[in-house]
Image: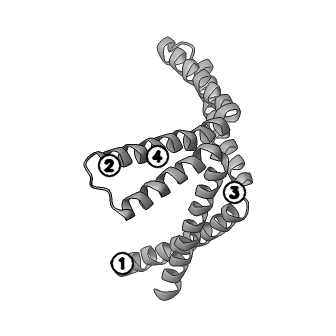
Amino acid sequence: MRRDDKMKNLLASLKKYVLLQGLFYLLFGIIIVMRPGATMNIFIKVIAGYFLVMGLISIVRGLKYKEEVLYSRMSLMGGVLYLIIAGAAVLFMRTLIGLLPILLGIFIIVSGINKWVYLNQFHMAEKRSYIYIGIMVALGIILLFNPFGAVLVAFRIFGVILIVMGIAELWNYVTYR
């Protein structure tokens, strides 16, 4: 195959990749924006499924190669660890995801209060500083008292970003034909 043909094949495959990537981004972005809670549940199950499969593969491999004692034991222990992680993902992932905004909320509130104390102590506060501090503390309180809603909003923003990326990829595909 000539070099020019290889280059044309490469460009053709890249164009297909751009098209598929754009469609994937667009589709999943729309799904995330429309159904963030359901999408998050699926995401958690996919993660748990991955660890479950990896755990089972490791256990089977450990049982298959019993004569290699160290390898067998490491595979079995790794497999059990993967299964524990899979179970924890199913049981606790939603809780961990819910705790993240609470911790961020506390951090943002404390940062806002510290900034207020600092600005007042050194007489550096301006009107816009108080507005900024007020917004920080308000957002921190929202994160603190509505953590799951905040996660869903953040997940929706991620969905919008995927939609924009998908449109950009599709635009590139159409433009560079």
| Residue underneath mark 2 | 120
Q: Nearer the viewer, mark 3 or mark 2?
A: 2
From the image, tell me which residue sits under label 1: 2
- Secondary structure found at label 2: helix
Instruction: Give the side of residue 49 with respect to residue 160, left or right.
Output: right
Which amino acid type corresponds to the residue marked 2 in the rendered image?
A: Asn
**Nearer-N-terminus badge (4/3):** 3
Decide which of tag 1 and tag 2 comes sooner along the chain.
Answer: 1
Which of the two marks, 1 or 2, is nearer to us in this view?
Answer: 2
What is the quadrant of the N terminus in the image?
A: bottom left
Q: CA distance from mark 4 to mark 1?
A: 60 Å
- Label 4, label 3: how far apart the Cα atoms are: 24 Å
| Secondary element at image label 3 | helix
The residue at 49%/73% (across/down) is 13
Of residue 163 and residue 139, the one placed in the foreground of this image is 139
Where in the figure is residue 34, as x and y percent of width and height? 72, 65
- For disc 4, the neighbor class at 10 Å (few under 14, some 14 to 19, many from 20) is many
Look at label 4 and name its amino acid.
Answer: Ile
**Mark 3 or mark 2: which comes first in sequence?**
3
The kind of residue tagged 3 is Pro
Residue 78 makes an appearance in the image: yes
Check the image and report above or below for 31 versus 97.
Answer: below
What residue is shown with label 4?
A: 108
Residue position for label 3: 36
